[in-house]
Amino acid sequence: GENVEQHPSTLSVQEGDSAVIKCTYSDSASNYFPWYKQELGKRPQLIIDIRSNVGEKKDQRIAVTLNKTAKHFSLHITETQPEDSAVYFCAAQPGFQKLVFGTGTRLLVSP
Amino acid sequence: DAGVIQSPRHEVTEMGQEVTLRCKPISGHDYLFWYRQTMMRGLELLIYFNNNVPIDDSGMPEDRFSAKMPNASFSTLKIQPSEPRDSAVYFCASSPQGARTGELFFGEGSRLTVL
């Protein structure tokens, strides 16, 4: 079955710096790659996603890149702010509506 | 819509007791998922339903776990008997069939502590 690996597990940056989180997946059939943000004690919520026919997608300060050949995708956050502090999960979809998540990255943005 | 509703939000029980977690998906969503979240393993898919029918239960850890969806607006996840290693946050999520994206809408979660 699909296996998603995510790195790093924790990431500390200064406010205004950029943050990059990387994920790899194993199933070449996966074609949908979302990113979820989970604030402390809250539910995970979708922040951005990308499909396999697109190499990059951007939404304001966040962007996601996908390399299907290498089976990896990344989340980029620019000009980080303290409210970006959260746990971020990547995921891959090997079958219709079934998402397999990575283990999460705890991002801490210090003022 | 109020979103996905889960109950209880917190449950503390003793080893060996039966635990039942409940979920009400968003109206009109035909997919329902149960995930377990722990520090060590992140978000693990336990089981998911489509139109009330279990599609994939390969993530259910063992026979102590069972899930049902008797109708489109209600699902339960039961653990019997419970063990300390079952302590985790259990999330229910729903998704509309035919959606362009596979976005999941999560509930607030049920935090289970087994002593």
Image: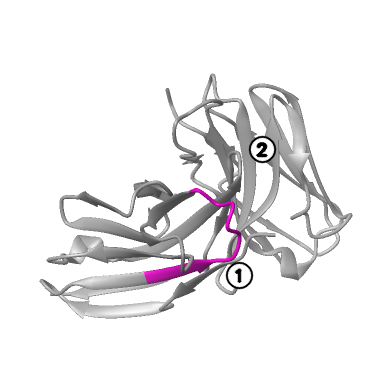
Asked whether the viewer can see residue B115, the reply is no
Give the magenta-colored segment's residue range: A22-31
Where does the image place residue B70, in percent across and percent down from the top left? 77, 25
Q: Secondary structure at mark 1?
A: loop
Which residue corresponds to mark 1? B41
Q: Nearer the viewer, residue B12 or A104?
A: A104
Left or right: A108 in relation to A16: right
Which residue corresponds to mark 2? B22
Where does the image place residue A84, in percent across and percent down from the top left? 24, 62
Q: Which of the marked residues, 2 or 1, is nearer the chain's N terminus? A: 2
The answer for how far apart the CA atoms under marks 2 and 1 are is: 22 Å
Residue type of the residue flagged with mark 2: Arg
Q: Is residue B61 magenta?
A: no
Chain ID of residue with mark 2? B
Q: Secondary structure at mark 2?
A: strand
Label annotation for residue A33? none
Where does the image place residue B50, in percent across and percent down from the top left? 68, 30
**Which image quadrant is residue A23 in?**
bottom left
Q: Please report the residue visible at 18 percent of the width from the left and 66 percent of the height from the top.
A: A82
Q: Please report the residue visible at 64 percent of the width from the left and 60 percent of the height from the top.
A: A2
Same chain, labels 2 and 1: yes
Q: Nearer the viewer, residue A69 or B18?
A: A69
